[in-house]
Image: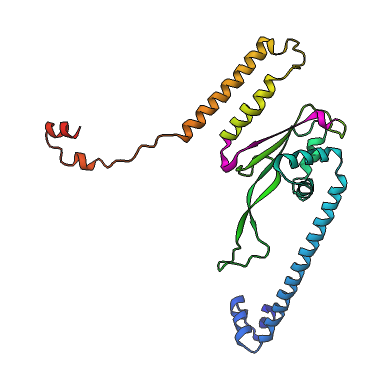
Amino acid sequence: TESKYHRHGGNLKTRSTELGSAVTGSSLTTVLPASSTVKKTIVLSSESRKELAKQAKVTKEERRAQIDGRHRYLISRLADGINLSEQQVEETIISDDKFQLIEQFFAPGGLKKLLFFYQEVLQSKSNASLRPDGSTNNLPQKKLFITMGSTEDFSGTCAFFLRASEEVITASNVFQEVNFGMFDCTNGNILQGLEFFLSHIMIPALKSQQNWGAVKEGLKNRQIQEFLYAVDKFVSTLSSSRQNIEDKIQLTKVDIDIYVRNLQNPSDYITAG
């Protein structure tokens, strides 16, 4: 547009002036190609979405083909723990953006832990109508997802897998090399969830442990007894801290002006006291 006006009019105008002339003057048709471009862009955007959906489907099927006995072990533990079907858990895992963390967990010397959160998250309803401000209705729905544990708020159930060694995790050793556990922190009450997990699961399991590796004396060994005492003491401290937080005393703010406004002599101070 600039070159046309420069060539025919001899004056170089600003872009805003030229666009105004294009709308109000005889060259109104110069605006029409823009609408065609917008339509083309919308079509391309729709095609892009279809292509992305197609790629996501291909990725899911590729991941599904990778599932073996190791993945089946994780899936079965998760399904039992959070009361979902194994098919639901499988679909969730192969659709997760952090699926590669599972492979990193299985690798020799890989990740020490693999975490899953199962909690309510805000999700946009696909058929929800737009609000006047352009936003959509976000509804809280329970979702299972893989996490590193440091980016998402924790307000539900945590399911975790821990490695017992640096060895590669295989379908034959996954039962011995991987430990599974869960603790519930509904409504974000992490202290209560951790206290329950330690006092009702971990400590009873430790106290019933018969094989302590190189320590042949087992529970009769003084170091093991001191260790169990320290764990008991930690849980007791944890419980006290939680109760102090829940039953904390809040002092009411008092307006003292009504007491000190008319203080004039010692007897007034005694009365106020």
Q: Is residue 191 above or below residue 31?
A: above
Furthest residue in direction bottom, as rendered: 26
Residue 52 coordinates in the image, percent (x, y): 78, 60
| Chain part drawn in magenta | 173-190
Q: Locate the C terminus by quadrant.
A: top left
Quarter holding residue 81: top right
Residue 147 coordinates in the image, percent (x, y): 69, 42
Q: Residue at 63%, 28% (x, y): give it.
A: 200
Q: Is residue 253 above or below residue 88?
A: above
Residue 246 coordinates in the image, percent (x, y): 48, 35
**Colour setting:** rainbow
Left or right position of 266 against 237: left
> For residue 187: magenta?
yes
Taking depth in this image into account, of 83 and 212 the one nearest to the observer is 83
Q: Residue at 13%, 31% (x, y): give it.
A: 266
Q: Residue at 70%, 20% (x, y): give it.
A: 208
